[in-house]
Image: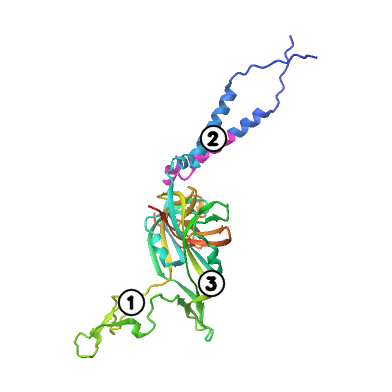
Amino acid sequence: MDTNVKHRKFKFNIIDFVIVLAVLVVILVVALRGGLVKKFTEAKDTIQYTVKISDIQIESFDLIEIDSKIYCNDDDSCLGVIKAKTYQPATMYTVLSNGEIVKTSQPGRIDVFLTIEAEGTVDEEGCRINGTYFIACGKNVSSYIDKLYFNFEVTEAFKKV
Amino acid sequence: MKKQKQVYRFNLIDAILIVLIIAVAAAILYFVTGDDGIFAKAKNDSKSKVHYVVELKTVDKDYLKNIVVGDSVTETIRSGNIGKIIDINIEPSWTITTDTETGEMKKSYYPPINAPQTSEDCTVEVEDSEENGTLDENDLETIGETVTDENQNFPELEYDYYNVRLTIETEMDYTGSSYTVGGYGIVVGYPVYFRTPTYVGSGYCIGFDVVE
């Protein structure tokens, strides 16, 4: 039985070259198409946006605290810090027996309006919180703060100057 | 000397090579055939210019300023460009309701937010210009600028919600059975989930016209 262990001398051959080249091509394509280059070169902006929380109980208003962080329910990412809050009676529309629609409000229920600030990017494609999460007027988001879960609709979003 | 025949064995290096070659091929394919790939322009030559209409129901009046002619439209599921807005039509939002006494179904508008409740709401009294102690129609200042033949003055009505029709222009491929833009099929009756730089919404395609 041969007990001598022969150490093979490493030689860089064509197979190694193909592997290195392939890895480089994959990295390059991912970087270009995935927007990694753009992400690292983009400047950070402050995005200010306003949202409407429709039809919640009036007691919940006190659970919303200024300067508290708000999170996306889908991926737990931070969507910014609440800077202001107001409310008004929750509006609803009722159809009368003659088919006419009238506007009314619900007792004990309110619509809440929040102003939120977040870091992100603003360019010709719109506002992206943390450079990735697109927001614009009309977008519905499932979110939460430390004491309250709610859905909101973005009513306006812009770059804070 | 007897020559020993070498037996081929599939090893780890072969597996890595195959995976890498497939990855490179996929990457190159993706790079050159995407919407903004290097062959995209050549592909555009075989496309048809299409105008299609998307109807958005019950859009808040405060959102209307965010829907702008010229904005590019991105489909939100796959984030592909599906054209640009070339025209916007709005009308007060309405819904079909039933008069439960007669059973008649009718088109009912949401109430205007500045609707006059009484005839007094339509006019505002001002000082008597003739100083004779009586007021005539010349002493009534109108709200708004619309004046009817009967000299009754009503302000232009404003509503909380509007229905919006967006006309979107794009270049589409015809696959033989349907029109697609960036692989996304659009035809009358299909829901369209989209965003512009300043608005996110959804609606149904209600019109489709191949222009060129």
Q: Nearer the viewer, mark 3 or mark 2?
A: 3
Structural crowding at the residue carrying mark 1, measured as other residues with C-alpha within 10 Å and reported as few (<14), some (14–19) or many (≥20): some
The lab-note entry on whether marks 1 and 2 share a chain reads no
Is B3 displayed left or right of A153 in the figure? Answer: right
Look at mark 2 in the image and give the residue it sits on: A26
Task: Tell me the quadrant of the picture where the N terminus of chain B can be found.
Answer: top right
Which residue is more in the foreground, A141 or B194?
A141
Q: Position of residue A23 (x, y in %)?
A: 56, 32
Structural crowding at the residue carrying mark 2, measured as other residues with C-alpha within 10 Å and reported as few (<14), some (14–19) or many (≥20): some
Q: Chain of mark 2?
A: A
Q: Position of residue B3 (x, y in %)?
A: 72, 13
The segment highlighted magenta reads B21-47
Is B17 displayed left or right of B47 in the figure? Answer: right
Which residue is more in the foreground, A30 or A39?
A39
Most frequent secondary structure within the magenta stretch:
helix
Q: What residue sits 68% from the left and 16% below the top? A: A7
Q: Nearer the viewer, mark 1 or mark 3?
A: 3
Q: Nearer the viewer, mark 1 or mark 2?
A: 1
Q: Residue furthest bottom?
A: B133
User: Which of the marked residues, 3 or 2, is nearer the chain's N terminus?
Assistant: 2
Q: Is residue B88 above or below residue B95?
A: above
Q: How many marks?
A: 3
